[in-house]
Image (spheres, coloured by chain):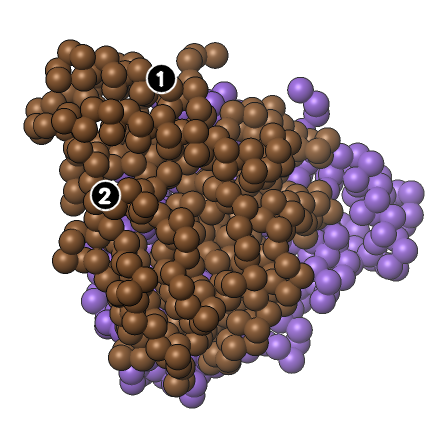
Chain colours: A brown, B purple
């Protein structure tokens, strides 16, 4: 087998080796069926065991209370941007959206398509290119908001809510780029959703964790069935054929995450990776310049920084690639370098990158 | 490697061996990247090549004219049931739906949720349990219908339109269970859609072939972006992260289909399989009783028949399983036996089943 490349893609992103190897081993013969897991009915007992285990592992790893349902839906965060207002905001409810980046703004705009002025912007840092999160004093949350929508990690800009926005309204949160990065209290959320392709598995599966009172709020009887959260919940995500192979890979990854000690271990690894990367950036602050302006808002998932010139940036990306590290080019609107260091990126991977960065400064600083 | 089971599941269903083996071989190292195809960015040049090839092969195999776009969307036929009326029928357009089975009826009901009485039933054979297709004289298609929706193959009931319903209105067709089963004239369709999990690949990918004038008819500016066909078309199905692994498997399968001679070869195989199966059923018409009442309407994809008693049916399913043949139990509303013989089921697979059927009649007839 050839050497594994160190994968810093922003998503679809690297996955842990062991669950992928398992998928490879049993790709033509799953659970002794003589068939691929892709080839078996979603109503078969063999697939059902995978489906139930994926749900149970999600509940266990995230410590999800009993009054929540775990759903697997398709369409990524983009379809969720639409489903949330279609299910919750078509009559007279109001909601507040905090726009802290490219993705948060999309969620806000999509909700406005459905609910117009009843969707309000509770805060934005757009005038500062989203280079920091809003301060508590900047949040304007209305008492009549059915929910406050926010994006826990801003993939493009590299900010992350380490303490969630202060409000007594329930949250709806897009956790696509930092789901399961650490243990947290789930009870404060009405809905959590996450495209799988960063921390959970391949693209094509969206994890939705929804509280029962939010399910009850979904009143859209005239909405096509696939768009109704209640139908997915009533049918345990088997209303229609789910993306079975994607859920199977997700199951493999969650089982692996459990085997290494769950979210506590994963959090410790992520914090160590952040210390190494930001440590190097801050040590060479004359060379590397962080995009994010407030240290407290720095993301441990996406680390954005600039080099002194665009030429050096290009050289950095090219040299890294020669050293088997890919995915480091910054997002088109921002430029510079973006290191995406999701759960599957190991501490050793980051050490290799940091050594490369040190060397690069030595040569070019 | 253990013996491959003969897979007669109705979907997700069996896939050809060669493309699956290719996926297994390169699961950890795709195209020399040192990463799985699941792990690479949907904006990378390596994934882009897969995406473009999947589109090109679809066009080539189906002989799709230039005024059509090929899209890959998520959510299966169920989401398409909703997207079609949401894109085309929210204002004043009218449409006719032909309901010929379980799935055709779902498409009709979902459209009515959006457009109410402007969605009309052009014909139905429900009073006969959908055991035949409507005759030409039974079709009531209105001149003001923007399209006529039909389901080319009825997976549950085992009927198939060998000649499409006569009308001068454009078709929208759910081809989920017989897409690419033979060459056909695409120009008469406004939209063709198909969940991949029968003839094309794993669940989680929906193929949509849409004519430009139908794209132009999509006027839903206030619809969330993911639900708008025009956005998917403008962005070449890369508006958001597509289900990359599913599209990769579909690409492998289409490349294999091309290598064996394309849809002409596939059609010949399917006709041979049908002759063998219906030949056996008709030969033993005192023992096997076809569910479908008109021979001309018999499906070559799903073959439904009854045995003399429920006990014999159970025995048939169990004995077949002992002989490494699975997925033969009839759909719950109909009972009996259903043989799903999609493109990946070989003539040899069907010969094995027919030998088993002959033996079964000898023992129990």
Instruction: Classify mark 2: helix, strand or loop.
Output: loop
Q: Is residue B117 left or right of residue B47?
A: right
Instruction: Classify mark 1: helix, strand or loop.
Output: helix
Instruction: Indicate whether A309 appears above or below B34.
Output: below
**Pick the front one: B77 or A123:** A123
Few, some or many residues within 10 Å of mark 1 (<14, 14–19, 20+): some
* Rendered location of residue A33, percent (x, y): 71, 34
Residue at 43% across, 76% down: A146
Residue at 28% across, 65% down: A137
Instruction: Indicate whether B35 appears above or below B207.
Output: above
Instruction: Indicate whether B286 appears above or below B57.
Output: below
Report which quarter residue A57 is drawn in: top right
Q: Which residue is mark 2?
A: A292
Instruction: Give the mark, 1 or 2, whose residue is nearer the N terminus.
Output: 2
* Rendered location of residue A339, percent (x, y): 30, 32
* Rendered location of residue B147, percent (x, y): 34, 73
Report which quarter residue B155 is drawn in: bottom right
Question: What is the count of numbered marks?
Answer: 2
| Tag 2 subunit | A
- The reply to whether the C-beta atoms of the residues labelled 1 and 2 are less than 8 Å apart is no
Residue at 91% across, 43% down: B363
Q: Which residue is mark 1?
A: A352
**Residue A322 visible within the image:** yes
């Amino acid at each position: 087998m050839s050497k594994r490349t160190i994968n810093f893609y922003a998503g679809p992103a690297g996955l842990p080796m062991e669950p992928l190897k398992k998928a490879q081993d049993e790709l033509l013969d799953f659970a002794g069926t003589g068939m691929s897991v892709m080839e078996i009915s979603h109503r078969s007992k063999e697939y059902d065991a995978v489906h139930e285990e994926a749900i149970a592992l999600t509940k266990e790893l995230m410590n999800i209370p009993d009054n929540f349902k775990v759903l697997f839906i398709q369409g990524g965060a983009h379809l969720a941007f639409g489903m949330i207002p279609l299910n919750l905001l078509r009559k007279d409810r109001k909601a507040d959206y905090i726009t802290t980046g490219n993705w948060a703004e999309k969620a806000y705009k999509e909700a406005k398509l459905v609910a117009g002025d009843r969707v309000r912007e509770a805060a934005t840092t757009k005038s500062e290119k989203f280079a920091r999160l809003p301060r508590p004093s900047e949040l304007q949350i209305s008492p009549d908001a059915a929910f406050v929508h926010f994006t826990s990690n801003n993939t493009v800009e590299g900010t992350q809510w380490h303490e969630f926005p202060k409000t007594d309204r329930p949250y709806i949160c897009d956790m696509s780029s930092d789901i399961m990065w650490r243990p947290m209290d789930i009870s404060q959320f009405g809905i959590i959703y996450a495209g799988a392709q960063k921390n959970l598995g391949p693209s094509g599966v969206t994890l939705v964790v929804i509280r029962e009172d939010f399910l009850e709020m979904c009143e859209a009887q005239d909405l096509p069935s696939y768009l109704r959260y209640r139908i997915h919940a009533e049918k345990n995500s088997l209303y229609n054929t789910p993306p079975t192979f994607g859920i199977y890979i997700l199951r493999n990854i969650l089982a692996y995450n459990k085997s290494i000690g769950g979210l506590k271990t994963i959090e410790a690894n992520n914090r160590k990776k952040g210390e190494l990367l930001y440590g190097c950036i801050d040590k060479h602050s004359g060379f590397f310049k962080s995009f994010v302006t407030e240290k407290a808002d720095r993301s441990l998932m996406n680390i954005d920084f600039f080099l002194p010139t665009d030429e050096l940036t290009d050289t950095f990306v090219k040299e890294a690639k020669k050293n088997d590290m890919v995915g480091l080019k910054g997002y088109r609107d921002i430029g510079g370098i973006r290191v995406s260091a999701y759960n599957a990126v190991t501490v050793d991977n980051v050490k290799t990158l940091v050594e490369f960065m040190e060397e690069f400064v030595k040569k070019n600083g």
